[in-house]
Amino acid sequence: MFKKITILFTAALFILVSNAILFASEGPKGNDRKGKYTYRKVYKSCSESGQVESATPKISPSDKTMAEWKSIFDTKNFDEFGCKDHWVSLSDEDFLDIYSYFYGHASDSPSPATCK
């Protein structure tokens, strides 16, 4: 009897902890790896059309905090990125992926990153 109760308690604890981990993330639910690729692709097309000086992105996720990126992507104010027509034409999925990339690698995130 004690063995059954222990197994039942362990299973319930495992399910509870698993759900807590899954729902603990408060950030966007996009694919940050795809977002990095899409961001570079958008920036490259901006460069090819002559709207920016360099094919290398000038803005890096670690340039701002998570709250600052959230504000920029919530208001869709992409003036500092340049190429406004390219940003407007992004699909919702691409937009969410890029947002996930910037949010997940912001200066105050657990893993800040730069575009290299």
Image (spheres, helix red, strand yellow):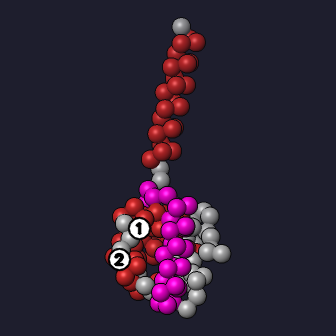
Whether tag 1 and tag 2 are in contact, CB under 8 A, the answer is no
**Residue 66 percent coordinates (x, y):** 49, 70
Quick one: SS at disc 2?
Answer: helix
Residue 65 visible in rendering: no
- Count the numbered circles shown: 2
**Residue 52 percent coordinates (x, y):** 51, 89
Question: Eyeballing the image, is 4 above or below 76?
Answer: above
Task: State the residue at coordinates (53%, 12%).
Answer: 4
Question: Picture quarter containing residue 109?
Answer: bottom right
Question: Picture quarter containing residue 84?
Answer: bottom left
Mark 2 = which residue? 88
Whole-number angstrom distance, CA of label 1 to CA of label 2: 9 Å
How crowded pointer 1 is (Cα within 10 Å; few <14, some 14-19, many 20+) is rated as many
Q: Amino acid at mark 2?
A: Val
How crowded pointer 2 is (Cα within 10 Å; few <14, some 14-19, many 20+) is rated as few
**Residue 5 percent coordinates (x, y):** 52, 15
Quick one: SS at disc 1?
Answer: helix
The prevailing secondary structure element of the residues shown in magenta is: helix
Magenta residues span 28-52
Q: Judge by depth and name the residue closer to the eye, 35 or 110.
A: 35
Residue 34 appears left or right of 28: right
Residue 82's disc number: none
* Magenta span contains residue 17: no
**Residue 17 percent coordinates (x, y):** 51, 38
Residue 95's disc number: 1
Q: Judge by depth and name the residue closer to the eye, 48 or 6.
A: 48
- Location of the C terminus by quadrant is bottom right
Q: Amino acid at mark 1?
A: Phe
